[in-house]
Amino acid sequence: MKIITKMINWSRLKSPWVLHFNTGACNACDIEIIASLTPRYDLERFGVLLKGTPRHADVLLCSGPVTKQIECRLLRIYEQMPEPKFVVAIGTCACTGGVFNGCYNVQGGINTVLPVSAYIPGCPASPKAIIDGVAKLLQSLEEGDKK
Ligand code: SF4
């Protein structure tokens, strides 16, 4: 049984499936996320695969601050993801609320609603920073798995 769990964890780390969700971004961070997934920057070389449903995703990539309108949808998406699941906040707005912090319709950064495993700052976060952040997340998960 232990070997099966190890194999599942190994395969998950070698090919994490991600879901991208805009929680209120201005769209620039979304374009950078898409750029990091397409052939020029090629996040897929780390086994990262974009999925269209939370039920198939291991990692939730969030861009933008959490607006009050989107908060319940974000929670619903997170709850639909299978365990173990990880959240990555991409861009300054997702990390802290950024320029939208304090707006009447903004809750704050992603961590005001969900536990965040990795923060990737930048306005917008560049594809290189996104790749670096995802690679570091995978590395830390692999090291945690070995303990
Ligand atoms: S961090 Fe900058 S680019 Fe990204 S959603 Fe916020 S304002 Fe837009």
Image (cartoon, helix red, strand yellow):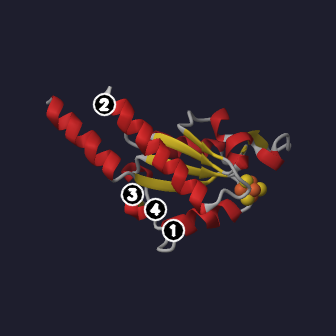
- The residue wearing badge 1 is 41
Disc 4 is placed on an element classified as helix
Q: Position of residue 77 (x, y in %)?
A: 51, 46
- The residue wearing badge 2 is 146
At label 4, counting other C-alpha atoms closer than 10 Å, the crowd grade (few under 14, some 14-19, many 20 or more) is many
The quadrant of the rendering that contains the C terminus is top left
- Amino acid carrying mark 3 in the image: Phe
Q: Answer whether labels 3 and 4 touch (C-beta < 8 Å).
A: yes
- Amino acid carrying mark 2 in the image: Lys
Q: In this view, does 84 lie to the left or right of 115?
A: left
- The residue wearing badge 3 is 46
Earlier in the chain: of badge 1 and badge 3, it is 1
Alpha carbon separation for disc pair 1 and 4? 6 Å
Alpha carbon separation for disc pair 2 and 3? 19 Å
- The residue wearing badge 4 is 43
Residue sitting farthest toward the bottom: 39
Alpha carbon separation for disc pair 4 and 2? 24 Å
Q: At 47% across and 42% down in the image, what residue appears?
A: 137
Q: At 73% across and 48% down in the image, what residue appears?
A: 93
At label 3, counting other C-alpha atoms closer than 10 Å, the crowd grade (few under 14, some 14-19, many 20 or more) is some
Identify the image quadrant of residue 114. top right
Instruction: Report the image quarter containing ligand 1.
Output: bottom right
Q: Is residue 54 above or below residue 104?
A: below
